[in-house]
Each structure stands twice: as structure tokens, then as C-alpha cells.
Image (spheres, coloured by chain):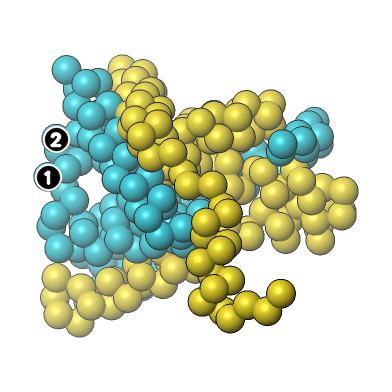
Chain colours: A cyan, B yellow
Amino acid sequence: MEYVRAFLLGGAICALSQILIDRTRLTPARILSGYVVLGLVLTALGVYQPLVDFGGAGATVPILGFGYSMARGVEQAVAQNGLIGAFTGGLSATAGGIAAAVFFSLLATFFFRPHDPS
Amino acid sequence: MKLSNEEYLRLSQKASPPSPSSRNIPAAFAVGGLLCALGQGVRALYENAGLSGDALAAATAATMVFLGVALTALGLYPRLAKLAGAGTLVPITGFANAVAAPALEFRAEGVVLGTCVKMFTIAGPVLVLGISASVLYGLILYVFGG
């Protein structure tokens, strides 16, 4: 059942994004960075946590979940360490994904050639 | 042939093919939903292995990112993206693709000035704005006591 909920919520977020792209022609860089900030703001407002509770990975796998992780991380870090937590919380919580993207991408360039995008 | 800006805009909009929304919205839903269900499965695997909390979230994100980079390196992710649009862009595998694709594409311009610089073409704005927003939120929490 949790897989069905993840599928439905994740699918709905992506379908809404597709409508947004079709209507506005926003570039991928704008969509991705906008969604991270949006996810953070929605979490700060208490709107995103119920979605995570409902849909699990359906809410955390979309890039909105990146903003959710940052917000949660910064909340915990400030509660624990005060002012410096404002600077460490966001990156600490998302370090796994960022480090993986950088490291595996660099690694891939040693073993793979770019593919013809056409 | 002389054209005013408005006329040019109208003509270019007429000439550029409309996105077939009837097809790509369901495709985005299906592929995006499947990637999230896959993420749920990855999460369950790590949970069974004994991970919890932050470590569980990080391991799931890192694994999905690995998958996105691998599919990009194999040339499969762009093909999927053509079909599914936002269904491949919005999940975290799309972020991985946004890092890996320019890293591979600009490798010919050198490891440092090609790969290392260009891998942040899209990820750069994401990190700059995401980190800045998180610091701002942290400062607000600190000042107003959360």
C-alpha cells in the first residue's frame, strides 16, 4: 500500500510539474532550484510534513524533498547547536545526495563518453 | 519582410510545435510515480538492513542519485526524459542527470575546466538558492526561537 501511495503522490507532483512546464516553458534549472526553495518553504510552513507522512518516497524523492530535508536538517541543527546550526543544518542533511551526484558523475567521465543527445 | 516584435512572437509561437500535453502529462505521472515507488523500495531495503532517521534518508537519496548517474552514463536517461519530461526531471534522479550529463558532455574540454566547472551548470543554482534559503530559515528560527 505504501508503494501505491508513493506512486500516486510522486506521479501527481510530476504531472503538475509537466503542466507547469507546458504552460510556462520554464527551464530545468529554474524548475529544480525553484522546487528546492518551494519544498523548504512548504516544510517551514508545516505543509510538507503531512505529504511525507502520507506518501513517503512519493514526497521525498521529488526534488521538493531536497528542500524538505534541508528544512528539517536546519531545524534540528539550530535546536541542537544554536546559531551555527543555521549554517550547517541544510547541507549536512543533504550531503549524501550532493556528494553522490558529484562523485559518481566525476567517476562516470573516466569510463563513459557522452551520448549523442539526438 | 519586415516584422514587428509582436508579429515575430506570434509567428514563432505558431511555428514551434505545441507540446502534446495529452500524452506527456500521463507519461510524466507514470514515470515520476514509478521512480518514487522505486525510491520507496530502496528505502525499505535500507530499513531492513537496520538504517533509520537521517542515515536512512541519506542512503536512499545517494542510491537514487547513483541510479540517475548510471542511467545517464549509459545514455538511457535522456531517452526516458524525452518521453516523460517532468517525470524524469523532478525526481532526484533528474538532479543526478543534471550533474552527470554536462560532466560527461564537457569532459573533452578538460577535467577541471570542462567536467568540474560544467557539472554545476544546473546544480549550481539549485545549491546556491537551496543553501541560502536554508541559512535564512535557520537564522529566522534562531532569532525567533523556532
Pointer 2 and pointer 1 on the same chain: yes
Residue B120 in sight from this viewpoint: yes
- Which quarter of the figure has residue A41? bottom left
- Residue B11 lies in quadrant: bottom right
Q: Looking at the image, is A28 positioned above or below residue B11?
A: above
Image mark count = 2
Residue A40 in percent (x, y) is at: 29, 60
Q: Which mark is residue A50?
A: 1
Q: Secondary structure at mark 1?
A: helix
Q: Position of residue B7 (x, y in %)?
A: 54, 73
Q: Which residue is tagged 2?
A: A54
Residue flagged by tag 1: what amino acid is it? Pro
Q: Are marks 2 and 1 in contact (CB under 8 Å)?
A: yes
**Residue at the image position 29 percent from the left and 56 percent from the top:** A39
Q: Where is residue B142, by image quadrant?
A: bottom left
Residue type, mark 2 in image: Phe
Q: Quote the CA–CA distance across marks 2 and 1.
A: 6 Å
Q: Residue at (61%, 34%) from the top-left corner?
A: B78
Q: Is residue B25 left or right of residue B124?
A: left
Tell me if residue A57 comes above or below residue B34 in the rendering: below
- Image quadrant in which the C terminus of chain A is located: top right
Side of A57 where A43 appears, left or right: left
